[in-house]
Image (cartoon, rainbow, N blue to C red):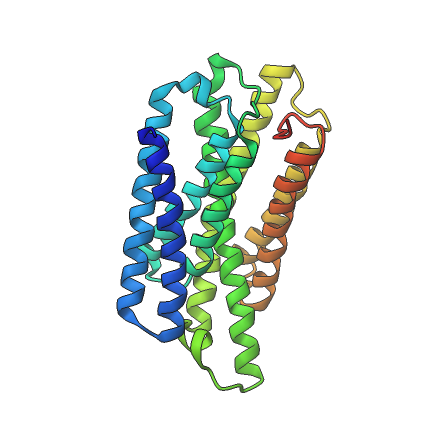
């Protein structure tokens, strides 16, 4: 068994244990279990980071052509953004969605092992940083906005129906705190998504001599950008908050996730992960 194999098993085990322990901590209202959950998830993130570095050093050009590396990187970026939000806004509850999603993405990366992504070698560094890097961070922020939206709607319904808050609902922060997480993720995420989309079109122009070729992924990406822009505008310019922004963040994330699953795996596209 190689060092990379050991790290990979450690990542799966630590993310799984971290997610499970956080649920236990929230339901039992145990601060000890929560602290243990963060330690486990943090350890998993450290192993994941080490694994990505080791993999890149083993053969950068080869690794950047493999689709499973990008899915693993997206899982890593979800955990990274979760820890950034946790540090900046002191909101722990988003880990309930971040850790399970990161684990799911990490495991799904193995389903694409052997599938290769077309990537010109002379553009790999620029493409990796400006296109993949910014888009993955933006999608991770959108994930947090969606998780905050779901929790906002859940808690709001409990409050409106005057149900007694217990267990999970009791552990959630106030509606204003949840809405603030949604706002921060949208305000930071939209400019990054825009940068990732623009650099992707530039890359397409340099590679295929067409900035826009009506590729299914390109069309859906533009639709997502328009919805994301609307959400960003309503948030920053018109002061939207609460229920409307929660629903819109959920819909934008759902379309993004379906785009990754439906288009990357099922349709012929420049971004295909299908073998």
Measured as percent of width and height from the top left, residue 7 is found at 33, 37
Front position in the image: 175 or 65: 65
- Horizontal side, residue 46 vs residue 8: left or right: left
- Horizontal side, residue 217 vs residue 124: left or right: right
For residue 265, above or below residue 238: above
Measured as percent of width and height from the top left, residue 250 is found at 59, 57
> How many circles with numbers are drawn on the protein?
0
Residue shown at the point (48%, 13%) measured from the top left: 121
Front position in the image: 186 or 110: 110
Using the rendered image of the protein, determine whether residue 128 is visible from the camera's viewpoint: yes
Measured as percent of width and height from the top left, residue 94 is found at 43, 59
Quadrant housing the C terminus = top right
For residue 179, above or below residue 251: below
Measured as percent of width and height from the top left, residue 197 is found at 57, 33
Corner quadrant of residue 36: bottom left
Front position in the image: 55 or 243: 55
Quadrant housing the N terminus = top left
Corner quadrant of residue 8: top left
């Amino acid at each position: 068994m190689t060092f990379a194999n050991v790290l990979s098993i450690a990542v799966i085990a630590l993310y799984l244990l971290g997610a499970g322990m956080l649920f236990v901590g929230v339901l039992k209202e145990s601060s000890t279990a929560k602290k243990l959950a963060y330690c486990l998830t943090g350890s998993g993130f450290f192993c994941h980071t080490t694994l990505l570095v080791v993999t890149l050093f083993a053969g950068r050009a080869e690794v950047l052509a493999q689709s499973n590396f990008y899915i693993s990187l997206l899982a890593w970026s979800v955990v990274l953004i979760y820890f950034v939000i946790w540090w900046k806004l002191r909101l722990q509850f988003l880990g309930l969605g971040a850790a399970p999603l990161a684990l799911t993405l990490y495991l799904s990366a193995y389903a694409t092992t052997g599938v290769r992504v077309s990537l010109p070698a002379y553009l790999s560094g620029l493409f990796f940083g400006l296109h993949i890097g910014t888009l993955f961070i933006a999608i991770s922020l959108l994930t947090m906005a969606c998780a905050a939206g779901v929790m906002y709607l859940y808690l709001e319904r409990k409050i409106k129906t005057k149900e007694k808050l217990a267990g999970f609902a009791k552990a959630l922060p106030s509606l204003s705190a949840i809405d603030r997480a949604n706002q921060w993720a949208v305000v930071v995420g939209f400019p990054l998504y825009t940068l990732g989309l623009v650099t992707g079109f530039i890359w397409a122009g340099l590679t295929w001599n067409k900035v826009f070729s009506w590729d299914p992924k390109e069309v859906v990406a533009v639709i997502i950008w328009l919805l994301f822009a609307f959400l960003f505008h309503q948030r920053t310019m018109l002061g939207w908050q609460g229920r409307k922004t929660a629903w819109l963040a959920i819909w934008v994330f759902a379309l993004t996730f379906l785009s990754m699953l439906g288009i990357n795996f099922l349709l012929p596209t420049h971004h295909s992960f299908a073998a």
